[in-house]
Amino acid sequence: MKPLSPRRFALLLGLCCLLPLAMLIVSPGIGTESGTVGFLDAWRAYFAGDTDSTAYLYGFELRLPRTLLALQVGFTLSLCGAVFQVLFRNPLATPYTLGVVNGGSLGALVAVKFGAALAALPLIQSLTTATGISIITLASFAGSMLVVGLILLITRGARRMGRAELLLAGVTMGLFCSALMMLLTYLSNVRQTFNIIRWMMGSLDTVAGDHALPSLALLIPSWLILLWQGRALNQYIVGEDVAAARGVSVRRLQTICLVSGSLATSAVIAICGPIGFVGLVVPQLVALMLGRDCRLLLPASGLVGAAFLAGCDWISQLALGWWESVTGTATSSASLPIGVVTALIGVPIFLVLLYRNATGSNAP
């Protein structure tokens, strides 16, 4: 592994920081609410203190909070994806490898199907009142953490968590949750089925400016913990025995990364639903460009992933408007689900990376 000098580290990380910063500056002018309001109009209204103007309302009440959430979710998924790819030594690993998305989806589907009954429970009423978040979000988070807890419980007796065993446990739990999801969908009525399908696509549509704030209490500690493991993960890449000989507690490192990554992923899934390909593609692109030193790979993946998802969200808001202008036909929705856009963009990128690897290029 090429040594990473402090100067090169600061330079590359600073360049990565410019991407989400540029998104924040331009974001008040991106959206479908009004084609006459640009980001310069929004910033003029902001600095003039004109909080009642249309430009301010569109820019800072609707567009900027949505971009902030996209940056938050993109950073989380890409950072966790990079950690899991290093931890499993598998470029196909994602934040959803341990069945987190399946458990979260199952929890959300249970809330959609039995929401009225759950809302009547005193404990659920207390939680929703105290946190200000919906039953679906609570159920999704609980489902994700239940799956992760079961997997860690199964593997607790091993001296080291074998990558193959963890992957098999994650796949098995995912298939089990998928079977229960199909059963619930089959038993649901038309309205419930529609809500289930829309949630499964992943979306930022229903999120207000303060809706995602409670999740930061889980995300920020998880981010810091994962970023702090960069040096230990560099030793882990060389080999578990070598890392142990150099003073790294392999079992402790695996547990910290798995729990922190799963906790952060569960928090964003509970808010936005499953958003694919961000945690799969972005870490591989960053590794291809910047190398595999985890001290740089982890924060750079998070920053690039944040900008990537914000860009995908812009496309999701503008795509249907472009379609209407080209075809002349009106659509029933204001924006595409963000999960659809990330899949449409992520699949070609992943296939290119796969082709590079198959032809012997220096792909990750």
Image (tube, rainbow, N blue to C red):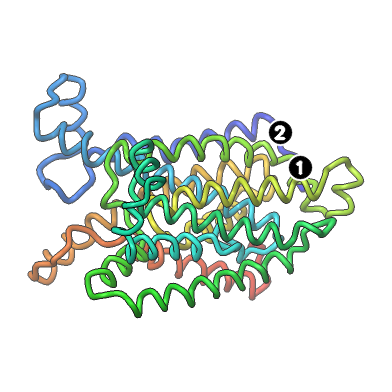
* In front of the other: 74 or 166: 166
In the image, 364 versus 254, the foreground residue is: 254
Residue nearer the viewer, 293 or 187: 187
Q: Which residue is mark 1?
A: 232
Q: Mark 2 near mark 1, Cβ–Cβ under 8 Å?
A: no
Q: Residue at x 67, y 67 (%)?
A: 167
Tell me the amino acid under the disc marked 2. Ser
Whether residue 170 sits left or right of residue 233 in the image: it is left
Residue lying at 38% horizontally and 74% vertically, measured from the top left:
184
Q: Is residue 311 above or below residue 187?
A: above
Q: Residue at x 81, y 49 (%)?
A: 250
Percent x, y for residue 295? 67, 40
Q: Residues within 10 Å of mark 2 (few under 14, many from 20)?
A: few
Spot occupied by residue 166 in the image (x, y as percentages of width and height): 70, 64
Q: Is residue 12 visible?
A: no
The x and y percentages for residue 240 are: 84, 54
As drawn, the label of residue 203 is none
Residue at left 9%, top 30%? 53
The CA distance from mark 2 to mark 1 is 17 Å
First in residue order: circle 2 vs circle 1: 2
Helix, strand or loop status at disc 2: loop
Left or right of 272, for residue 144: right
Question: In front here: 177 or 289?
Answer: 177
Vertical placement of residue 363 versus 58, above or below: below
The kind of residue on which mark 1 rests is Ala
Location of residue 183 with respect to 73 vertically, above or below:
below
- Label 1 SS: helix
Label 2: which residue? Answer: 5
